[in-house]
Image: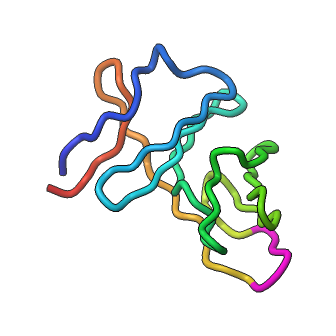
C-alpha cells in the first residue's frame, strides 16, 4: 500500500470540500462539524456529483434526488425513488502535515 496525499492539514477548515480524481476513483474530501470525511464523489443512485450536496450533521444529501447517506458508514438513510447501494467511504490517513488515503501498489 502507498500513501496518496490529498491535502495539507493547514488548508482544511470548517466547510472545506474538494473533489479528487485518483486513477478510477472519484473522491470528495470534506470537513464538517470539526470532522473530516472522505467519500466517493458521486451519488450511487445516478452518479450526480456530491460537491454541492447539503450536509446536516453526519448526513449528506444529494442535490439531484435528495438521497441521504450517513457520512461515517455510507449507509443509505433515505431514498426518494428506488433504493440504491450505500455510499462508499474511505479511511483517512495522516502522514506528516498531510491527509490522504492508502492506495494499492
Q: Nearer the viewer, residue 45 or 92?
A: 45
Q: What is the total number of numbered labels drawn onto the structure image?
A: 0
Q: From this view, report whether residue 43 is shown above or below residue 56.
A: below
Colouring of the image? rainbow
Residue at the image point whose x is 82% and y is 63% from the top: 66
Q: Nearer the viewer, residue 67 or 101?
A: 67
Name the spot of residue 78 as percent of width and height, x first. 81, 70
Name the spot of residue 63 as percent of width and height, x first. 78, 56
Magenta stretch: helix, strand or loop mostly: loop
In the rendered image, the residue lying farthest to the right is 80
Drawn side of residue 100 relative to residue 71, left or right: left
In the rendered image, the residue lying farthest to the left is 105
Q: From this view, report whether residue 50 is shown above or below residue 44.
A: above
Snapshot quadrant of residue 45: bottom right
Residue at the image point whose x is 79% and y is 42% from the top: 57
Residue at the image point whose x is 61% and y is 55% from the top: 49
Please state the extent of the stretch shown in magenta in the rendering: 77-82
Drawn side of residue 71 relative to residue 81, left or right: left
Residue at the image point whose x is 66% and y is 80% from the top: 84
Q: From this view, report whether residue 61 is shown above or below residue 96.
A: below
Name the spot of residue 98 as percent of width and height, x first. 35, 25
In the rendered image, the residue lying farthest to the top is 10
| Residue 93 located within the stretch drawn in magenta | no
Snapshot quadrant of residue 9: top left
Name the spot of residue 17 as percent of width and height, x first. 60, 35
Task: Indicate the quadrant containing the C terminus: top left, top right, bottom left or bottom right.
Answer: bottom left
Drawn side of residue 61 relative to residue 22, left or right: right
In the rendered image, the residue lying farthest to the bottom is 82
Amino acid at each position: 500500500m502507498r500513501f496518496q496525499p490529498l491535502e495539507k492539514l493547514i488548508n482544511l477548515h470548517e466547510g472545506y470540500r474538494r473533489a479528487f480524481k485518483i486513477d478510477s476513483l472519484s473522491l470528495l474530501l470534506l470537513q464538517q462539524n470539526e470532522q473530516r470525511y472522505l467519500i466517493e464523489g458521486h451519488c450511487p443512485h445516478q452518479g450526480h456529483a456530491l460537491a454541492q450536496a447539503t450536509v446536516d450533521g453526519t448526513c449528506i444529501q444529494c442535490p439531484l434526488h435528495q438521497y441521504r447517506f450517513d457520512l461515517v458508514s455510507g449507509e443509505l438513510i433515505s431514498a426518494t425513488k428506488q433504493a440504491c447501494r450505500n455510499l462508499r467511504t474511505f479511511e483517512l490517513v495522516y502522514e506528516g502535515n498531510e491527509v490522504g488515503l492508502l492506495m494499492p501498489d
